[in-house]
Image: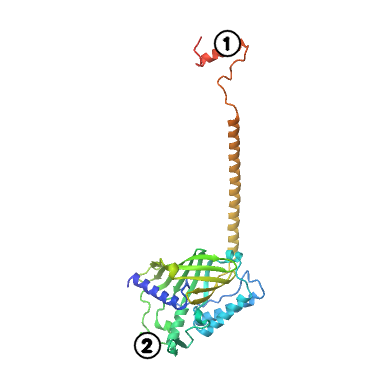
Amino acid sequence: MSRYNVASSLLLLATFTTNTASAFTSAPGAKTGVAFQQQTFSSTSLFAGSLAIAPAKENLLSVANRIRSEEGIFVLDAETQSEFRNAVSELEAVSNPPSSAEYESFFEGDWTLVCTTASSSSKKGSSPFGKDKLKLPFIGEIEIPEIIQDVRKSVNNRLKVTQRIKSSSRIDHILEIEPANELTEIIPSGVPEALSALSSLNLNPLEVTDAKVTLIHKAEVQSVTPVLRTKLGLESVVVSAAGTSQYLDTAGADLLGINLPLGEFLNAGTFDTTYMDDTLRISRGKVGVVDQLRVFVKEPKTAAEIDSAAAAAAEITSMSVDETEMSVEVEMEVEETKVSDEEEESSPPASDDDDAPTNGDSSSSDKYMKNRADDGRLPPP
């Protein structure tokens, strides 16, 4: 199997996942061997502030962490979506949109996606998926076999999503997928008897250890206040993987890159940040008729990182002061040179006849004429 086939398979998986749950979600990092360890995010924050905000934030994180552990990142069940939305709305109700200062301080960085929902705006609060049933047009509700539920949850749990905000003009969504080695890893409840012959099938013949799809977006911050609104347009997709087979680089390498010249128009969306502090961010967006709600978290800065940032800022300030002082000195030197030049220009030019004698001084006149003859200005008498 060639690198192109590997990349194509990863890209198809990423496209299916993002189209099903969220066209603009992203993810960096799964490790090999075991399914992603479910991380519990806390509300420890330097800026948690208000007495009303703190409990609402704690409740949202508690609900999001539980949903993540049970359902994964993409929330598909209608009842679970409703619970998630209610917890988000409670925090939004007691807080204000991010200020300009909060935007400057917190917006950039790596934000880990905890949970996300996507639903049609024509029927808010609902999802075509239930825990045990699937709603199909013209057919109605049908039971979802347990095996399909297992596969859905397994794939969901094997994703980890990070939104990397590099600047106000570029935002990367990185979807990293942990490969499964055996069928039992995808169907933890047990392989059906009809598939028992496949239970020992190697699902990872290329020995992929890390698979990643990066969605690179052009970003535009359309406003900061009264609402922080960002427009995203998908520009390119990069597929990379690492593995131990002869077809893959153990350190990881890009396998496929695709530029999307019309992505800014065909794959664009606008997202509002309704709440943000140093560790939690709520994003609401709309792509077509699909409403999206996401909750992101970011690791708080350590004391060492804060000190380092302060030292860097102080150094920049010091450099600016030094540059200003140097600029003033240069300007003073230029001004002094200009004044000196002006003084020289205003002084009368020295004459060759400065030693000419005054009237009535015959001895001086004779000496003057002799000097003129000596230096060649007059022929000798």
Name the image quarter holding the N terminus: bottom left
Q: Position of residue 185 (x, y in %)?
A: 43, 82
Residue 334 quadrant? top right
Q: Residue at x 34, y 72 (%)?
A: 5
Q: Where is residue 158 in the image (x, y as percent from the top left)?
A: 46, 77
Q: Residue 376 carries which label?
A: none
Above or below: residue 72 compared with residue 298:
below
Q: Which residue is drawn at 61% across and 45% down?
A: 328
Q: Distance between the residues labelled 2 and 1?
A: 133 Å
* Residue 306 to residue 286: above or below: above
Q: Mark 1 points at which residue?
A: 366
Q: For the view shown, which residue lies furthest in the top direction?
A: 381
**Left or right of 225 on screen, residue 162:** left
Residue 196's label in the rendered image is: 2
Res 136 → quadrant: bottom left
Amino acid tagged 2: Ser
